[in-house]
Amino acid sequence: MKRLLSRLFLLPLGLIAATAPTALAATEFADGTTDLPKPRFVSTKSNSAMMRTGPGERFPIKWEYKRAGLPVEVLQEYEIWRKVRDPAGEIGWMNKALLTSQRTAIITGQTRLLYVSPDVKSRIAWRIAPGAVVLVTLCEDLWCRVSKDGKSGYILRSEMWGTYKREKIEG
């Protein structure tokens, strides 16, 4: 219970209510696995998503995430189960029904600046607190365009968790 409460404190409640960037086209096989790349980032679909110690409901619950839109990294697939890593580095298994291809990221470190264009010399659009989850709409090189609560701006990719170093995202 203490771990759950600390997890909820570190990851404040919130929802991402926006359209997702274009999802990867996937072939789903009869066993529930896909041909999508691994690793890859996805996000939680539900306000109650259980991470388990193994790939099945018979395995104990390791964490319960009370936040839709939280980014997680898919490391492996086994039937309908996805082995994932959360922003804190915890690894466990989640049912694919609890995940969506919507791209989100979580702000890391300290309060961050978002700019009107991908340049630190451009005007500051807004500030965002660590732990905030944002919708990722575009990433090229060092910069990503993100949005939250009707606001958008550019942030350095290194100031958030949920994208790969040179990954290109188009929304």
Image (cartoon, grey):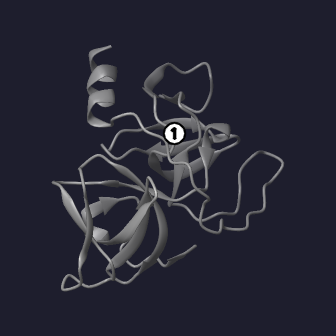
User: Toward the viewer: 84 or 47?
Assistant: 47
State left or right for residue 160 relative to residue 73.
left
Q: Which is nearer the eye, 90 or 126? A: 126
Figure check: 53 above or below 169 = above
Residue 43: x and y in percent read 52, 49
Residue 22 vs 141, above or below: the answer is above
* Front-lying residue, 17 or 57: 17
* Residue type pointed to by label 1: Ala
Element assignment for label 1: loop
Q: Residue at x 33, y 82 (%)?
A: 117
Q: Count of labels shown?
A: 1
Q: x and y percent of residue 97 in the render?
A: 68, 38
Q: Residue at x 65, y 42 (%)?
A: 96
Q: Residue furthest right?
A: 30
State the residue at coordinates (53%, 31%).
47
Q: Quadrant of residue 91?
A: top left
Q: What x and y, as percent, mark residue 67?
A: 46, 35
For residue 8, above or below residue 71: above
Identify the residue shown where x is 46% and y is 48%. Answer: 72
**Figure quadrant of the C terminus:** bottom right
Image quarter where the N terminus lies is top left
Instruction: From the viewer's perspective, tell me whether residue 11 is left or right of residue 150.
Output: left
Query: Residue 2 in the image: x percent, y percent?
Result: 27, 16
Asked whether 125 or 113 is in front, the reply is 125
Task: Give the residue furthest to the top.
Answer: 1
Q: Which of the 4 image quadrants contains residue 139? A: bottom left
List the residue tagged with mark 1: 68
Point out the residue furthest to the left here. Answer: 110
Find residue 143 and report its image quarter.
Answer: bottom left
Pointer 1 local density, CA inside 10 Å: few below 14, some 14–19, many at least 20: many
